Image (tube, rainbow, N blue to C red):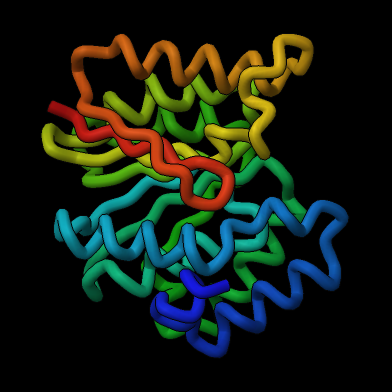
Amino acid sequence: KYCKEHTASDNRLLSELEQYTWDNEDVPQMISGQMVGKFLQSIIRMIAAQKIVEVGTFTGYSALQMAEAIPLDGEIHTCELMKKHAETAQSFFDKSDYGKKITIHQGPALESLETLKVGNFDMAFIDADKSNYLEYYKRCLVLIRAGGVIILDNMLWSGSVIDPNDDDSKALRKTGDYIQEDTRVFNMLFPIRDGLMLCIKK
């Protein structure tokens, strides 16, 4: 609570979207939330990111957070499998002053990522199905420039990332172990919310 009280507040539309998500979605805790959103904005501002790829749109909260921080001519390409979530996100993007910066690619994310230009992005944010996390990371690493950043959410998985019997935990642990040994990046795991892995491409 103290951390949230000493972090930049969300604008009205972001607050509305967060409340909508909690009121209408079956798994509302999938939303990134204020702390993660402002962390993303902080990284964007620090590296002056202009082009961002996101894997996992959900209701569009994190995309709108990031769109607020990039310049007017910046771009966010966000990948979402579920048509329902893509439509919800677009409805909120249409209400936002920043929404025109965001393009939704609806369909399997790995297929959408293959259509994007290699080395063209400054940052990637991954928050989607855990079974494909490692493949998302590998593809995003190709898409971002040297000095660019990849951020992966849920890397602590509510503290169960070390559970040997949970499939999602196994996938996250495999991803974390791969990143730890990947000499192409400098990485750090932050204990923010559900765990954010920050990777800087060398």
Percent position of residue 145, x then y: 16, 35
Residue 198 in view of the camera = yes
Residue 63 in view of the camera = no
Q: Quadrant of residue 21?
A: bottom right
Tell me which residue sits at (24%, 75%) in the image.
72
Q: Nearer the viewer, residue 37 or 116?
A: 37
Q: Nearer the viewer, residue 28 or 13?
A: 28
Percent position of residue 165, x then y: 78, 11
Q: Nearer the viewer, residue 25 or 168?
A: 168
Tell me which residue sits at (36%, 74%) in the image.
68
Percent position of residue 164, x then y: 71, 10
Tell me which residue sits at (26%, 56%) in the image.
43
Q: Is 96 left, or right, of 6 in this rendering?
A: right
Could you tell me which quadrant the N terminus lies in?
bottom right
Could you tell me which quadrant the C terminus lies in?
top left
Examine the rendered structure and indicate whether residue 5 appears above or below residue 125: below
Q: Quadrant of residue 198?
A: top left
Name the residue at the bottom extreme. 12
Tell me which residue sits at (55%, 17%) in the image.
173
Percent position of residue 15, x then y: 61, 81
Q: Nearer the viewer, residue 32 or 188?
A: 188
The image shows a total of numbered marks equal to 0
Examine the rendered structure and indicate whether residue 88 appears above or below residue 49: below
Q: Is 168 left, or right, of 78 in this rendering?
A: right
Examine the rendered structure and indicate whether residue 125 appears above or below residue 7: above
Q: Is 117 left, or right, of 108 in this rendering?
A: left
